[in-house]
Amino acid sequence: MRKCIRIPANAKIDEPGEVEGNVVFTYLDAFETDAGALDALKARYRRADWETVAVKHHLIEVLERLLAPSVSAARSSRATPTS
């Protein structure tokens, strides 16, 4: 996820971000369950109130939350010996 967006070398930290066509926001649109929080995040990103790195970290948190039950089940099944 950290390599999803490349920031041009001449980009300034206070420049507004593009949400449309941004692969990180495409994933967030698909997996973020809190629509209000996602809308607020998009608005802040467009105003340059949130850096790209922070948005990527948020996506990683969303994906980890989504995958946690599967990861836990996989770990449990590996830990349980079969007869």
Image (spheres, rainbow, N blue to C red):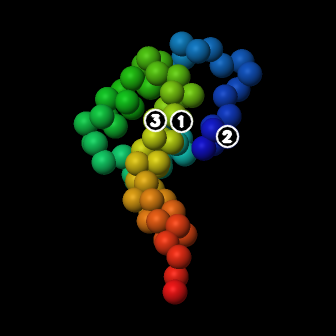
Structural crowding at the residue carrying mark 1, measured as other residues with C-alpha within 10 Å and reported as few (<14), some (14–19) or many (≥20): some
Question: Front-most of 70 and 17?
Answer: 70
Q: Residue at x 30, y 48 (%)?
A: 33
Q: x and y percent of residue 75 in the render? A: 51, 63
Residue at (44% x, 26% y) in the render: 45
How many neighbours does mark 3 have within 10 angstroms: few (below 14), some (14-19), or many (20 or more)? some
- Residue on which disc 2 sits: 3
Which is more N-terminal, label 2 or label 1?
2
Instruction: In the rendered view, tell whether residue 79 sits above or below residue 65.
Output: below
Q: Nearer the viewer, residue 71 or 77?
A: 77
Is residue 51 in view? Answer: yes
Q: Amino acid at mark 3?
A: His
- The answer to whether 32 is drawn above or below residue 71 in the figure is above
Query: Helix or strand or loop: what does disc 2 sit on?
Result: loop
Report x, y in % for residue 12: 62, 14
Mark 1, residue position: 56
User: Tag 3 or tag 2, which sits nearer the N-term?
Assistant: 2
Residue 58 image label: 3
- Extreme-right residue of the structure: 9
Q: Residue at x 44, y 17 (%)?
A: 49
At label 1, the amino acid type is Lys
For residue 34, side relative to residue 76 (left or right): left
Residue 65, x across and y down, in percent: 40, 48
